[in-house]
């Protein structure tokens, strides 16, 4: 069993070399190529994802800076708007007060004028009424000279006591 | 009749049994590899994934020993590993014997490995490769030591062929003999005329499965040792320092 058989030895060597060549060409070689290709793809993808992650980090920082600037700007715009609104409100209130003051003083003046007019009218009517009453009384009691004197006294008395 | 009782002597076209088993081994390897080629896809699964597992195992071993130049030598390492592994496993199938249980087959493999790494060494370093057999440069008066080292190195390199082939052959042959004897005991249990004979051979029922399991382990370990030593020899030949 341990004797060296040269034909078997040579057959083994030749078969091994030929069979290995065949199996490498038809199956193992393509599989090894595919494994290397896959390794390359995986390596490329890892590198690509690293680069993309770095780019994303840079973009994120940019966006954060921009967001901060936008936030500050919006804050200043908002506070300016609040200030403007307060100013506008104060202006409106002031104008309204002025308008109201004007309207009130106008109304007061009209009221005074109307009162004066009414007082005059009333005074005239009272005077007329007093004259009528006096006329009728005097006609019945006294002569014409006395009537006129009395009438004059009455009228003077009215003038001395104005209506408020 | 073979010394291995279990093995059947085949007489097909007057081809010796070891050669027939060796051809069968290659037939199985090529058939399965072709099937794998048809099923091959970028996403490893099924038989293609299994092949990739074996390939990666050998490639990693070669890469760690040789370095970036290792891919140039992949075909031999893969061929040696797969052939020895499948050849060893064939012997575990009843009715078949491992081609690696024949010294001529293992010696052939060892000669291929030896010739390959010597060739790669000369190819890589040229004449400088032969100088490394003399050992480190010593003063002129120690030249006889260099000459002695040359002969020692030459002997050690040829001893590698013997150790490679004998290690594999002895392990697998022992496994085959053991399995053959257990198969004979199996027959003795059923065909034995006396009760004593049956009683003595009953142990075969749990011993044989255990030995087959051990055979699987030995088959894998021996295939790996052969491939690993080939890798180490190639690494020693092609690495710098010669």
Image (tube, coloured by chain):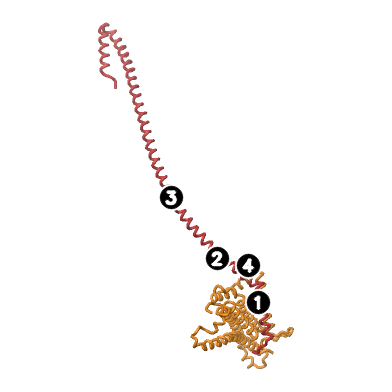
The answer to whether dots 3 and 4 both sit on one chain is no
Earlier-in-chain disc, 3 versus 1: 1
Residue B154: image quadrant is bottom right
How far, Cα to Cα, is label 2 from label 3?
A: 39 Å
Camera-side residue: B24 or A128? Answer: B24
Q: Are marks 2 and 1 on the same chain?
A: yes
Asked which secondary structure carries label 4, the reply is: loop
Residue annotated with mark 4: B41
Residue B99 position, x and y percent, is 65, 83
Pointers 2 and 3 in contact (C-beta within 8 Å): no
- Element class at badge 3: helix
Mark 3 to mark 4 CA distance (whole Å): 52 Å
Tag 1 and tag 4 share a subunit: no
Disc 3 + disc 1, Cβ < 8 Å: no
Label annotation for residue A20: 1
Quadrant (top left, top right, bottom left, bottom right) of the C terminus of chain B? bottom right
Q: Which mark is residue A149?
A: none
Chain letter matching colour orange = B
Please determine whether, in this image, residue B45 is positioned above or below residue B241.
above
Q: Which residue is mark 3?
A: A69
Q: Colour of chain A?
A: red
Residue B205 in view, yes or no: no
Going from N to C along the chain, the mark reached first, 2 or 1, is 1
Q: Is residue B58 above or below residue A141?
A: below
For disc 3, the neighbor class at 10 Å (few under 14, some 14 to 19, many from 20) is few
Q: Quadrant of residue B227?
A: bottom right
């Amino acid at each position: 069993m341990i004797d060296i058989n040269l034909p078997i030895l040579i057959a083994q060597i030749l078969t091994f070399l030929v069979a290995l060549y065949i199996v490498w060409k038809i199956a193992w070689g393509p599989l090894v190529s595919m494994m290397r290709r896959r390794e390359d793809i995986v390596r490329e993808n890892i590198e690509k994802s690293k680069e993309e992650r770095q780019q994303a980090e840079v973009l994120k920082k940019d966006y954060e800076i921009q967001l901060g600037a936008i936030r500050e700007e919006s804050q200043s715009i908002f506070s300016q708007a609040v200030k403007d609104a307060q100013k506008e409100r104060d202006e409106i209130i002031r104008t309204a007060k002025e308008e109201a003051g004007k309207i009130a003083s106008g109304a007061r003046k009209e009221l005074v004028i109307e009162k004066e007019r009414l007082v005059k009218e009333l005074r005239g009517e009272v005077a007329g009424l007093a004259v009528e009453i006096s006329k009728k009384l005097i006609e019945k009691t006294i002569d014409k000279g006395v009537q006129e004197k009395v009438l004059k006294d009455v009228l003077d008395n009215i003038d001395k006591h104005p209506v408020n | 009749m073979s010394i291995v009782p279990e093995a059947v002597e085949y007489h097909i076209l007057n081809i010796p049994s070891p050669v027939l088993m060796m051809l069968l081994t290659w037939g199985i390897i090529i058939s399965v590899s072709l099937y794998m080629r048809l099923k091959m896809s970028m996403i490893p699964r099924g038989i293609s994934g299994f092949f990739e597992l074996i390939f990666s195992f050998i490639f990693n071993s070669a890469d760690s020993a040789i370095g970036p130049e290792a891919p140039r030598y992949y075909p031999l390492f893969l061929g040696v590993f797969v052939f020895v592994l499948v050849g060893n496993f064939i012997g575990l199938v009843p009715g078949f014997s491992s081609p690696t249980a024949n010294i001529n087959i293992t010696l052939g493999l060892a000669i291929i490995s030896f010739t390959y790494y010597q060739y790669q060494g000369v190819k890589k370093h040229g004449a400088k490769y032969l100088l490394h057999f003399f050992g480190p440069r010593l003063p002129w008066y120690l030249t006889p030591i260099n000459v002695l080292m040359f002969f020692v190195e030459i002997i050690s390199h040829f001893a590698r062929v013997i150790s490679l082939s004998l290690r594999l052959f002895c392990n697998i042959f022992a496994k085959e003999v053991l399995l053959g004897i257990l198969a004979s005991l199996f027959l003795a249990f059923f065909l034995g005329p006396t009760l004593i004979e049956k009683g003595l051979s009953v142990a075969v029922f749990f011993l044989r499965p255990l030995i087959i399991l051990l055979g699987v382990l030995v088959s894998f370990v021996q295939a790996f040792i052969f491939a690993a030593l080939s890798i180490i020899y190639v690494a020693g030949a092609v690495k710098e320092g010669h």
